[in-house]
Image (cartoon, rainbow, N blue to C red):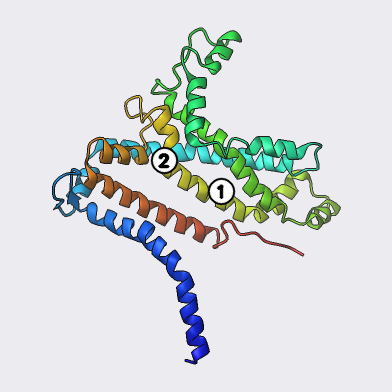
Amino acid sequence: MSKVNRGRGVLIALFLAPSLLVFTIYRIIPIVWNVVLSFQRWKLIGIPRFVGFSNYLALSQDPVFWESFRNTLYYFFGGTPIAIGAAVVLSLLVNKPLKGRNIYRALIFLPYPITPVAIAIIWKWLYDEKVGLINYVLRSLGLLRESIGFLSSFTWALPSVIFTTIWQSLGYYVILLLAGLQTIPDELYEAAEIDGATGMRKFQWITLPLLKPSLFLCFIVGIMNSFTTFDVIYVMTNGGPGNATEILVTYIYKKAFTFNEIGPAAAMTLILFLFLLVVTMVSNKISGGEAGGVHYYE
């Protein structure tokens, strides 16, 4: 190796070293430590004791763990497909040359930058059984005789939280899909019109296939948000009533910091990490490695 190449390699290593150090400290070491903790019994005081796979066996027999896992799946399938479907419709509308479309885009995107805690507080008030705006409007219109306890009902609690999440994430999905729509050349639509294609046919054979990378990106973002969201549920319901809105992340938090059961919490965290890793890899494989990719056509 020449002195020039050796010097260039040293320079590259020096530039990469700070980032690699930070990545190792804040990513690699916590993951490794979490794996170690998942095989130990520790109550935050005293000396951790190695227990093998006991934490994982205990989780397999824990009904709250399975209920929280089902709630997490319900939280994803009940919210993400609806949010993405609505985002497709809205992105198609605001992508047209409408008067004031920039204002519409801003209004649609507006909820996303708001912090989840603020959104949770706002919607907790809106859902309130006594002074909430939603119950007030429904009673004023004669649609309800008695107020609904949206967040205190086993039936309504999780759907109410899901609707809040849809409202918050909708604008982000619209932005992602708009980016994909604006890479599709108008010439394709013009050629389809010459061939007599209707609006639905153009959507089916042009828009939808070319929008696939953006749709898969929305899908992956939805998975990550559904399985890692914490703030909204913690503030709105804290997993209640009962375990009606308990999802994996809130249960992990309670296991670790309420019950001081660090080992089971670490085991659940590792299970969640591996589950998301597999789902993301499978989704990326199905999308042909194009999730989020932007194509330019000439």
Residue, far right: 194
Q: Earlier in the sequence, mark 2 or mark 1?
A: 2
Q: Residues within 10 Å of mark 2 (few under 14, many from 20)?
A: some
Q: Residue at x 61, y 40 (%)?
A: 171
Q: Which mark is residue 218?
A: 1
Which label belongs to residue 269? Answer: none
Residue at 44% over, 23% down:
156
Q: Quadrant of residue 185?
A: bottom right
Q: Amino acid at mark 1?
A: Cys
Which residue is disc 2 drawn over? 73
The kind of residue tagged 2 is Leu
Which residue: 62% across, 38% down?
A: 86
Considering only vertical position in the picture, is 215 above or below 164? below
Q: Position of residue 240 (x, y in %)?
A: 35, 27
Q: Residue furthest bottom?
A: 2
Left or right of 241 on screen, residue 171: right
